[in-house]
Structure formats: C-alpha cells, structure tokens
Amino acid sequence: MTAPSVTPSQVRSALLLRDEIALLDLRHEADFATGHPLFAANMAAGRIALEAETRLPRKDVPIVVYDAGEGLVPHAVDRLQALGYNDIRQLDGGLRAWRDAGYELFQDVNSYAKAFGELVESRRHTPSLPAEEVAALIASKANIAVLDVRRFDEYATMNIPGSVSVPGAELVLRAGRAAPDPATTIVVNCAGRTRSIIGTQSLINAGVPNKVVALRNGTIGWTLAKQNLEHGADRRGGIGPFEGAQQNARDVAYRAGVRHVGVAESMALQAQTRRTLYRFDVRDAEEYAAGHVAGFRHYPGGQLVQEIDMAAPVRGARILLTDDRGVRADMTASWLAQMGWETYVLDGGYDRQLEVGPPLVLPKPDAAHRYRRPYEGTDVDTGAMQAYLDWEYGLVEQLRRDATHGFFVI
C-alpha cells in the first residue's frame, strides 16, 4: 500500500520546530551508514515486525519512511499499518530528494550523538592526551587510573593494559572507588572519541577532585600509535562515588534543564497519550534484573547517550529516566537535555513492588547487513581507523551546515 507523501522541506520544518517525528531509513544498517539525514533512525524494512513496537511505543506517532530507490517503502507501510500505526507518510523522492534539496547527509551510525560529542569537545575544550603520553605514564607507573567507558563486552575484547571497566554513566558513581586519591589522574577511554569525551566531561561537570583527561582517539588512537592492547580482561570498577557526587550530579542535571518528577507526576506524563514517552532504567543489567520499576526498559546510561537514535527514534518525544541511586539518571539526563530532548528523572518509585527479570534485548541485524565499525573486534585496518577519525573531526562543521540540531552545551 502507498502512503501520502511529505516533502524534505516539511520534514526539516518538523525537526526544527521539535514536532514529534520518526524519520525511518528502511535500508539495511550497512547501507544506512553510507549516508542519511541527521535525525533519521535506521529500521530495516525486514525488522519492522521485530523492532517497531519497542522503538515506536505510540501507534499514532507521525512516521516518515524512505529508502534510496530500492522499493522498500510499500512493504514497510503495509507492515507498519498491520501493527496498528496510523500516521505514516513517505518521503517524496526518497533519499535522493533530500540530497537534491541541498540538505546534509551524515555517514556512520549513531551520527548525531557522535556529532554532539565533537561539539562538546569543541566548546568545552575537553582535555585529552595522545596515546604515546598515556603509554609513557603507564610505563613509568605514574599515579593514574585508566577507566574504560565502553560496554563490558567491548572492554573484554580488547582494552588499554591495566585499565578498569567503568561503563559510561557509571563514572561519576564509581570514580571515588576507582581513584580514591584526589592526586590520581583519571584517563577515560572508549573505542574512538565520543564516549571518552562525554565521560571525561561528565566527571569534570560533576566536580570530581581529580585531574581528568580523555585518551585522545581511544583504542583507535592507541592502535595507530602502535601500542599493545590487552585481551580478556575482567576488571570492573566498584561502586563508590566521590564526596558530593550525588548532589553535584543533580546540579548538573538542573543546569541542563532536566526536571525531576515524583511517581504521581510520572503517571501524569504517561497519561498524556498524545505524546510519546520513552522510559529507561539506566542502571547496569544486574541491578535491573534484580528489580526495576514496571514499564521501564533497560538501557545503560552511557550507551543511551551514544545510541539515542536507536533507543528513541521519535525525535521530539519525552524521555523519563530512573535510577535508584540518582547519579546515573541525572548525568545521563543532563546530556540528553543538551541534545535537545525534553528529559525527566523519576524521584522514588523503588519503595513499592518491583518487576524482576532480565532486560529486553533486540537481536542484532544479520551479520551480512550490519555496519562493521572500524574499531570492532581485534582486526587492525589502520586506513579505515584513520578515515573514521577524520570523519569525526569534520562533524562540527557538518552540524553547522545542517543547522537542525538545536544542541547546546552547558
């Protein structure tokens, strides 16, 4: 079945006005990564039945679908309508029309989160050290702690020697134990740039007493500098916030415009069914499985910031976060708010009956259709790694040309 058309300029207007819109790219992930509008979300046509109801919780949300001429739109419209979605349009002329209108196309996946990270570094001058300097500090047994903010499975695959796994939003909650001596320099690393920039700036924003720097260009930069990586490590940072961390995190969220709501107000948000509300529990998977507030989907905070296009494809929606300790929700919310989201944190809710059970995990795309990031696995393709970094360096200028983002940096 065909759907009514909408022009590229109408989609762009909706994005500028912060109207709710799910702009869905129906191609496989590998094709999506070759170029797409900034706020497009990838939902391959063949995965709609698997993903739509989790990622698009409101059945009357405005949806715009497009492809690059592969003929995916009619079947995708049929699938969405069969699931009960009733406000579906197709982008007139598809991806080519977007490009022909003079609008920007962004490569890779999680593009706007990565662009935001580059904007943060540009505006806050987030400190970093090159791989050679960090390696020299490690070799000299200097007073440093290297904290890896990737998912634990990424860390276990390959990591900076001696580093400890402290995924993303856990940093402020665990830095006091990972580096109890204020004289210890904390080095934050990820695979490339985004998560280390956000992690480093999170600690700085929250007022950690330690000096904090990012490992410039992460494990990619480390590999390009011909430094050795460790494999199979299982060191995890324990919980232990530095003094004042909880209140400082709340202050950071406040400065970013995050609103705190109680249980009654959160129910009122849910009752406003003409708006999409995403609810995420940003703790680690074990905590979530042991007991979580009903209706909240698990998404670790650091990954949520990087993967927000995957977690919440409806741009203009509301986001409500929960965390029984507060710190992780506040820090995560502070970044999402700066990325233009209407963001709330739930106070309380853990003093009543909780649901137990493991997180919902959507299966990854078939390997043949996945976009393989140049830092994945243990293979070394230095040319691809350098090209990836060069692409990231250009994102701030591309954001300026695109002019739809609405990001701000506190």
Image: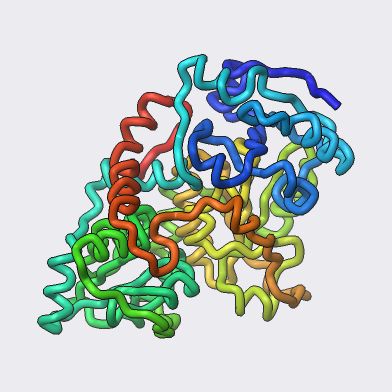
- Compared with 155, 58 (above or below) is above
- Compared with 322, 258 (above or below) is above
**Position of 151 compared to 5: left or right?**
left
Which residue is at 40% across, 67% downward? 149
Q: Nearer the viewer, residue 117 or 245?
A: 117
Q: Tell me where residue 206 sits by quadrant.
A: bottom left
Q: Is residue 257 visible?
A: no
Where is residue 177 drawn, in percent x and y?
Answer: 35, 82
Q: Tell me where residue 202 sits by quadrant.
A: bottom left
Q: Nearer the viewer, residue 265 or 10?
A: 10
How is the model colour-coded? Answer: rainbow
- Compared with 60, 187 (above or below) is below
Question: On the rendered image, what quadrant is the C terminus found in?
Answer: top left
Q: Nearer the viewer, residue 335 or 235?
A: 235
Question: On the rendered image, what quadrant is the N terminus found in?
Answer: top right
Where is residue 104 drawn, in percent x and y?
Answer: 45, 26
